[in-house]
Image (tube, rainbow, N blue to C red):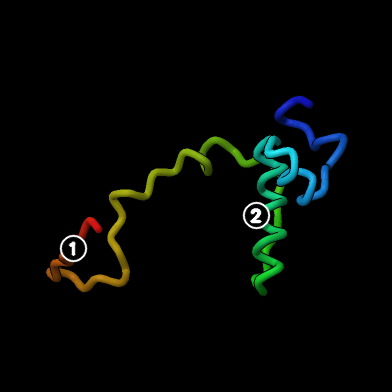
Amino acid sequence: DPPDRFPSVIPSPSNVLLWQKGDCFDFAIVLCSLLIGVGYDAYVVYGIAPRELTTKNESLMENPFIKKGEVMIIYARKN
């Protein structure tokens, strides 16, 4: 199937796990199935977005949860 079209066949999540093969859409359905199984409200969303939205870089935006002048220290520990 072309990557810009909805798949013609959607296998069940159990078959995808059994085969251990599939595309990103198949595994998104598996993930949603697992999340729904443990109580989350999960959906697979399919669609397109304009380039301006998908390449929007927000890495230089200020974090609204950190006050101005405050320094955040992050510790990482390797087990």
Q: Nearer the viewer, residue 73 or 50?
A: 73
Is 8 on the left or on the right of 65, as rendered?
A: right
Tag 2, which secondary structure?
helix
Name the residue type under label 2.
Leu
Residue 71 lies in quadrant: bottom left
Is 15 on the left or on the right of 54, as rendered?
A: right
The quarter of the image holding the N terminus is top right
**Residue drawn at (14%, 71%), measured in percent from left and top?**
70
- Residue 44 on image: x %, y %: 70, 53
Q: 5 above or below 10?
A: above
Is 43 on the left or on the right of 8, as rendered?
A: left
Ranked by sequence position, the earlier of labels 1 and 2 is 2
Q: Which residue position is annotated with label 1? A: 75
Name the residue type under label 1.
Tyr
Marks 1/2: CA–CA distance? 30 Å
- Residue 26 on image: x %, y %: 72, 43
Whether residues under marks 1 and 2 lie with C-beta atoms below 8 angstroms apart, the answer is no
Residue 72 lies in quadrant: bottom left
**Residue drawn at (67%, 63%), measured in percent from left and top?**
42
Tag 1, which secondary structure?
loop
State the mark number for residue 31.
Answer: 2
- Residue 51 on image: x %, y %: 54, 35
- Residue 64 on image: x %, y %: 32, 69
